[in-house]
Image (tube, helix red, strand yellow):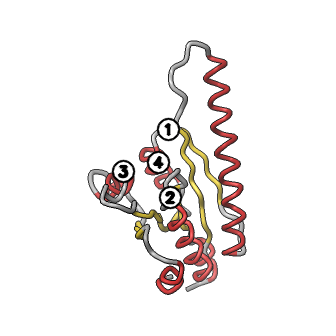
Amino acid sequence: MPEAAQRDRVFLVVVDDSEERHVALRYACLRAKKSGGRVALLRVIEPPGQTEWAGVGALMAEEQRDAAEKLLSGLAVDVQDITGGYPILLIREGDPRDELLALLEEEKRISILVLAAAGGSGGPGPLIAALTGRFASRLRVPMTIVPATIGLDELERVT
């Protein structure tokens, strides 16, 4: 594979509050490292609800953004430790599914979406369910779904 094409391979991980996000992140990092690609981290924050005072809503939005920046900065250190490169950090506001689909449409550098399926019997998770169902036709990149229960040794083997 040409070196430029390898550098352009971007593995996108959605950073939500689920336990399984760590598995998706590790998988994406290992794939990026082994293929010479790069990791992108997306955190979607939901807009604050209607409040009586505009200042309260603005303060809530600022706090959410600060928390998202701190979370992504911490994860960026982990990504850099594994891959040797700093990830692309993305923060968007809105519905996670809608913002993810919009980002995939806008950002042509993203080559692969990496998500981890929820553990347990409650289904794969709302984002995976939407992207493999009703919204599957809107995906423009392949999606890799990593089982939440996969171990570190197995992750190393499959990447």
Q: Looking at this view, is 154 or 76 the one in front?
A: 154
User: Considering depth in this image, is 85 or 140 the residue closer to the camera?
Assistant: 85
Residue 84 rendering spot, x and y as whole percentages: 72, 75
Specify the quadrant of the image occupied by residue 82: bottom right
Instruction: Name the residue rendered at 48%, 67% in the picture.
Output: 112
Neighbour class for label 4 at 10 Å: few (<14), some, many (≥20)? few
> Could one spot residue 144 in this view of the protein?
no
Tell me, for residue 102, which label it has, or none: 4
Q: Is residue 87 above or below residue 50?
A: below
Residue type, mark 1 in image: Gly
Contact flag, marks 3 and 2 (Cβ < 8 Å): no
Mark 3 → mark 4, Cα distance in angstroms: 17 Å
Pick whichever of labels 3 and 4 is earlier in the sequence.
Answer: 4
Give the x, y percent position of residue 59.
67, 26
Q: Which residue is mark 1?
A: 94
> Which residue carries the number 3 mark?
126
What residue is shown at x 37% (from left), y 54% (from top)? 125
Please tell me how crowded label 3 is: few (under 14), some (14-19), or many (20+) other residues with Cα within 10 Å: few
Quadrant showing the N terminus: bottom right
In the figure, is residue 101 to the left or right of 71?
left
Spatial separation of the CA atoms under disc 1 and disc 4:
11 Å
Tag 1, which secondary structure? loop
Point out the residue furthest to the top here: 52
